[in-house]
Amino acid sequence: MENKIILKRLYNDYTRKFLPKILLSVFFSLIVAGSTAAIAWLLDPAIKKIFIDKDEKLILVIPVAIILAFSLKGGSLYFAKTILIRTAQEITKIIQMQVMRSLITADTEVIDKKHTGKFISHLTFDVSLISRLVSNVILNLTKDSFTLIGLLIVMFYQNWKLAFFAIIMIPLATIAARSLGKRIGKVTVEAADRTGELSSYLIEIFKNHKMIKIFQKENYEFGRTERFINNLKEKVVKIETVLVRASPIMETLTGLMIALLIFYSGKLIMSGELGLNNFFSFLAAMMLAYQPVRSLATLNMSLNQGLAAARRILPLIDNQNKIKELENAKELKIKKGEIKFEKVKFKYNKDEGEILNDINIFIEGGEMTSLVGHSGAGKSSLLNLIPRFYDRDDGDIKIDNQSIYNTKIRSLRSNISLVAQDITLFDDTIRNNILYANPDASNEELNEAAKFSYSKEFIEKLPNKFETLIGENGIRLSGGEKQRISIARAMLKKSSIILLDEATSSLDADTETKIQEAIKLLTNNKTTLVIAHRLSTIKNSKKIYVINDGKIVADGNHEHLLKNSEIYKNFYEKQLRKD
């Protein structure tokens, strides 16, 4: 994406709506410029009238005028900065909301392909650079440009020959900064990558802290931490080094210009072409011009940093989901809840082999159907196709003879509840975790779901009951308690179709019994497709499909498959929990 296109996009999508505020900031920048120029000009009458002519009438007026000029400059600069700071933060909020909206609605494939830490880096590091592009670049561009113009007017007013001489510094400073600007863009991208890697690593550390302790890997992780932090440090040092690299160049140019100016001015004063008062006013204007010239020369660097960040952020915002609904998509109407797979094929990537191949299965409405097979056979992939977490490559999936690809995605998912093997809970109260399925549910419905999922008995024992905070992903709950909360959440949704991936973890007999009872209540008279790991679930299933290497190799009930399927028999003897 070219820089011009990015800048145009940033202006149209974000900056333009804040144009009145930006123009107000520009107005205050004009006052800053005018007051700065006035300060330089006032030295002319101050020296001539007070020190040379010894005019007693102006001995008070000129100092007061200088105080007013400085006060006006300071107040205007404050308002110009605060307006743009607020504007930049508003733009930051808009961009962050757009990124989050894109990520929340993104296909599962998009989220799975990148580590969480990288997304966090986009939301923090990259967005902050774009914010700085708005606040710093716009402010400095307007304030310093106007200030420089005002000071140049003062210089030309005092002596046009010296003014032309001083202007030479501006192109020299610009040329020096241009090469640094290209370098800063590249280093910024590298720093953003290192920030993402560090964020990803930290998430892994916090998530796996028990593993670190049990395998006594503290020293190993200290070493890895040092490497990640050191890599980021080196990139930040590079950025800061490039940013300050302009300082020696600018200082040298300024020193050279002042030395030549004093030499040339001395010649002009000696020849009577320049008065002492004019010289000091000119010198003040030139010295005050140093800061805006330096700022404008290095503006290129901030601009390149913001553009580098925008190149990473904008594709995220523009992400187009592969999983889309048709324009004429219809509401899904559930009658029996029958699910039918017709010659379904699926693979995650085009260059990989097929995960599912020619799947033809029928899941009877209101009944439980089980999928069994060894790990990696394709069971979870098949389950994920029903709510359209992924889309099939070929074939069709129908619910009550309605293709799910012709129905509205919201309508489809509203009729499906999922109880996953890896329980996902939020760092919130038990109440809010259960109500996540239906925030408008009454207290009576909440208590009913907790009761039938066998959650209420342990909730009542907690000091804060339903208001208990459960920690990140339910860390303060046991495995069985988390499963029951997950089942309660699914119950509260009251959907017609249940997708269940049974947990493989072993629980004590009492908890196991309660979870099995809760699942029975959850799936009663509901169309249920379960990835089964327990014998009791298998026996409760109306039909069992055996999946191996992405294909359905056998189907029937438990007794039939034991007699007629070697794969099922092997699975039964080696992997099935005979609870």
Image (cartoon, rainbow, N blue to C red):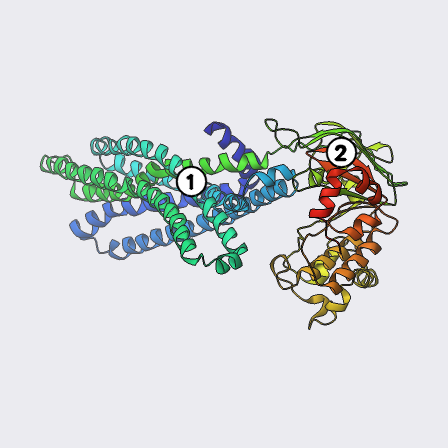
Q: 145 or 411, which lies in front?
A: 411
Residue under the point 26% across and 37% down = 155
- In the image, taking residue 345 as reference, residue 184 lies left or right, namely left
Task: Mark yes or no: residue 178 visible.
Answer: yes
Q: Position of residue 271 (x, y in %)?
A: 10, 34
Amino acid bearing label 1: Val
Q: Secondary structure at mark 2?
A: strand
Q: Amino acid at mark 2?
A: Val
Q: Position of residue 195 (x, y in %)?
A: 45, 46
Marking on residue 553:
2
Q: Quadrant of residue 383?
A: top right
SS for callout 1: helix
The correct choice, above or below, for 569 with respect to 510 in the image is above
Residues 359 and 506: in front is 506
**Can see residue 441?**
no
Q: Are circles 2 and 1 on residues that touch, CB within 8 Å?
A: no
Query: Callout 1: 10 Å neighbours few (<14), some, many (20+)?
Result: many
The mark lying in front, picked from 2 and 1, is 2
Relative to 107, is 245 on the left or the right? left
Residue that badge 1 annotates: 137
Q: Quadrant of residue 302?
A: top left
Q: Position of residue 300 (x, y in %)?
A: 37, 35
How far, Cα to Cα, is label 2 from label 1?
A: 65 Å
**Residue lying at 22% horizontally and 40% vertically, measured from the top left:** 254
Q: Residue furthest left?
A: 270
Q: Earlier in the sequence, mark 2 or mark 1?
A: 1
Q: Nearer the viewer, residue 534 or 1?
A: 534
The quadrant in which the C terminus is found is bottom right
Q: Is residue 447 above or below residue 248?
A: below
How crowded pointer 2 is (Cα within 10 Å; few <14, some 14-19, many 20+) is rated as some
Q: Taking 163 as reference, is 11 left or right?
A: right
Q: Position of residue 143 (x, y in %)?
A: 39, 42
